[in-house]
Amino acid sequence: MKKLIIGIMLLVVLFQVVYSEAAFAEVEYSQELFESLAVNKNKVPHIEIPDYKRIELENGLIVYLVEDHQLPIIEIKGYINGGRRQETKELAGISSFMVEMMNTGTKHFNEKEMANYKDINGIDFAFGVSNDYLSFAGSALSTDTDELISLMAEMLEEPKFNANHFTRVKQELYRGLVQAKTQESSLLDMYFYKNIYKNHPYSFDDDIDLNIAALSNITPERLESFYDKNISPANTIFAIVGDLDTKQMEQMLYNYFNQWGMIEEDKEQESTENKQLKDKESEVKSQEEAKEKSKYQDIEVEIKKPIVEIDRENYGKIILVNKPDATQAKIKMGYNFFDNSFKDRIDFTMANIVYGGGDFESRLMNKLRTEKGFVYGIAANDQYNELGGAYYISTEVKPENTYQAIEGIKEEMSLIKNGEKKIKEDELFKIINLYNAFFPKSYKSKLSVINRVIRDVELQGRDIDYINKVIEEYNQLSASKAQEVFAEYSYPQRFLTVIVGRKEEILPQFEEQEVDIEVVEIN
Amino acid sequence: MRKFFKILLLSLLLILFGVSSIYAQQLNQKELFIPKLDYSHFKLDNGLEIYVFEDHKIPLAKFSIWYKVGSIDEPEGISGISHLLEHTMFLGTESLAKDQVHQLIKSVGGSNNAGTYYDYTTYYEEIPSAKLELAMAIEADRMRNLKVNPEEFYREREVVKQERRMRVENNIFSSSLEEIQAEAFKESPLHHQVIGWMEDINNITVEDIRDYYTRYYAPNNGVMVVSGDVDPQEVHTLAQKYYGSYQPQEIKRLEAIEPEQKSERIIKLKKMTQVPIIAMLYKIPKGDHPDMVAINALLDILVNNSTSRVKTELQQKKRMILEAGGFTVGLRKPGYALLYTVPMSEGIVYDVRYDFDQELEKLIEQGIKENELKIVKKRVLKDLIFSQKDISSAADTVATSVVRYNDPTLYQKNIQRLKNLTTKDIIRVAQKYFVRDNRTIGYILPKN
């Protein structure tokens, strides 16, 4: 019996020793270990479209409602079709001025009152400007839902452009523009986009000189007129997501928005009636039906479609903006590119990530950072708009490396284009694998999914499930197809190159190579 | 178009990287709840702390290792070494080739990066949760087995020098802050920025890097934080497997104490700018000091909120300034609060500074309205609830508290402090810290 106990004890001790050794044994690191741990192919994700209710009010306003009760919060994301492309040269920058005024006061709230209302109720709400639409976003705790929705309605429907702070806002915008001429990023974008988009409204926002000149033309009356012509319930759409009750929210929206755009006498009549929502079938009307309603003013907005004219004079052109205090050269090089309807967009985007996606593994990062130590970061971007886009590469280098960096960027593009360094299956696999892992993260919240849905469906006229079609399409992409589209749509000879930096350090490099370069001196 | 101000704000956000502001609780609200922040905690025998935050919504995990070392640990002459070491950590180990960390992580469909701040350095991998062990193995390997190839090291040093040009030298505000901070902190390593002086970066050698690495990269000087679709027990088992055999070591830190400032310091900086900027730096205590909640509330009431005293009076009423704001840098050592404003023109710079001071004095003498305090509490409450949309940001908040103060419950303490905060507390900290003798002013003025 004693022997048995000793035997058991020995076994226990032995087991503990072995177990302890296993737990604390030094891991032997090797290529084999890491390679064995790195085998992985992610599942092709599917993005679930959350349950939503789409409401269209009689005035054409479209709202998507999504309930999400995980946190006691409410979030709004919205768009007003049109944007910067509605501007004229004489009034360049008017969209930004208009939203600045809309963000800071209304007919019933002066600047101080609005700031106080937002702060007291913990509300964030603001408009922004893009090339093809105005956008807005808001948030609050769900206990302040009514305050948020009523403020949004007030800001959308009742702006005041002749407010006391008009002159101050104008002065602030002017000082901001003047200051922008001392900033390397602003200078870079100004000379890049005003050459790429020439006189098209897409160039206006970055053209500091044009904005300064146009600022004097902007008056409260012109802001009002621009607002009247461009902001209407018929071209506005937004989503409300969060801790809400759909039925109650519908009622609230009806109360706050149904009179937007209504003729005054109809408003008065409507106000005397019971505002309760009518039968669901009658309340949700098609846009066509809404348009026919005579009680609304002329709420249709004419969306302009000016053509982007491509200037071939830009091909191969180099502009050096002299900034005497710069200790680096900031570079942006690119050319005109496709609009939103580009048929090979998804394939090209994936192929472009191999070339210059911005991560550590891209061809450009490998060449210019990992091999040469020239750059901290470098990225190639494809940027699309409704009427035309741009493709560009941006980076910063030590001034004496400017010429070599630019040549390196072109060389890497050419190596893919001419097939000397074709896009490989494993390079593409890594990107597709990464996208498959991170797509669900990008669309983790219901707000992000529904935001995508309203952009796809309402702004771009795509299917509701377009996001899943994107996933399907990039998963079907082969390296040979990626190679083919990159080769077809990359143009190293077309680069317009803008450099902001010290002329004394940069110019000689180009002169030595007998390369023509236009030097711009900033006033 | 407010490009410049957006850039200025962006600069400030970059400066604030790592500084969190979660400290609030439900305060007299209508049926509002704050979801509890839940996590598991383990500690290995060698001192490595492990925090796990579960979130099973999507099959992703974020693995991070935080080292208690940053630029405030750097001696004179090798400023920027913490950050340069962070870059060097990607150049390979005895088993891994240069940049193979990126390749491995990307091969599984993950992403990775690292960051250095005044008082910590962090490395992270965001990976499909099934690949947690890969991240664990990579970080364990480079905690102990870094290989520094001189040729690669000197090439990477050039990358860091370019990063300095990009982040600091060619940004008016960042380059000015570097000089203002150097004037304010004469003896402590807050004298320099995280990225270090260019001359020092140039002088850092392979030997310096090896010594620094050996000195600070140890399990008992690190904190592991894992969030996402993970099982805490599995994290513990893997941590034991990969880190369990590592021995703890004594961490000897630089002891540099900043002497008490006796009088106001002023510097004028001539920059290529059209608008002047006034930056006022006040020294404040360590980030876990009970006064920090009141200090942050003071900044909101004085200068940050849309309804703040300075914005209402100097921007909206008197039209003297274009912008104003303030933030705190709370660290494991005494840090600073920076208040800034952008006067409309150079000609009124000193009037603006005077009027700014007057607003602070009025606040002290005439008191704070209950409404102003209510706004602060509301804002913090909202931020706290919204921050819970993303578990990894909540995890980072706990991580910074542990790395800095060895206190994962700091955010809870701060919720309580905020709940108890009174207008008198705010006035008290204004009188204690926001005095001229504790201030360094930088006037950033147009060169021409």
Image (cartoon, rainbow, N blue to C red):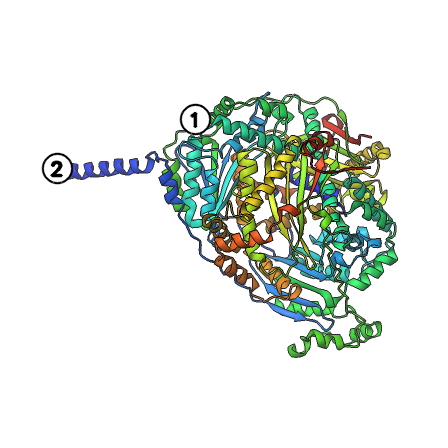
Which of the labelled discs sits on residue B249, or is there none? 1
Label 2 Cα crowd, 10 Å radius (few <14 / some 14-19 / many 20+): few
The three-letter code of the residue at mark 2 reads Lys
Label 1 Cα crowd, 10 Å radius (few <14 / some 14-19 / many 20+): some
Q: Chain of mark 1?
A: B
Q: Is residue A450 left or right of residue A173?
A: left
The three-letter code of the residue at mark 1 reads Gln
Kindly state the secondary structure of the residue where label 1 is placed.
loop
Q: Position of residue B100 (x, y in %)?
A: 45, 38
Is A254 or A387 nearer to us in this picture? A387
Image quadrant in which you'd find residue B249: top left
Q: Is residue B329 above or below residue A456?
A: above
Q: Is residue A137 visible?
A: yes
Q: Is residue B189 above or below residue B103?
A: above
Q: Is residue B39 visible?
A: no
Which of the labelled discs sits on residue A3, or is there none? 2
Q: Position of residue B33 (x, y in %)?
A: 58, 54
Do discs 2 and 1 share a chain?
no
Look at the image and tell me in which quarter the C terminus of chain B lies.
top right
Q: Chain of mark 2?
A: A
Determine whether label 2 and label 1 are within 8 Å by CB: no
Is B21 or A384 nearer to us in this picture? A384
Q: Is residue A484 above or below residue B138?
A: below
Instruction: Determine the residue located farthest toward the front in the rendered image.
Output: A514
Q: How far apart, in angstroms, are the residues tagged by discs 2 and 1?
A: 44 Å
Image quadrant in which you'd find residue B348: top right
Q: Position of residue A93 (x, y in %)?
A: 79, 52
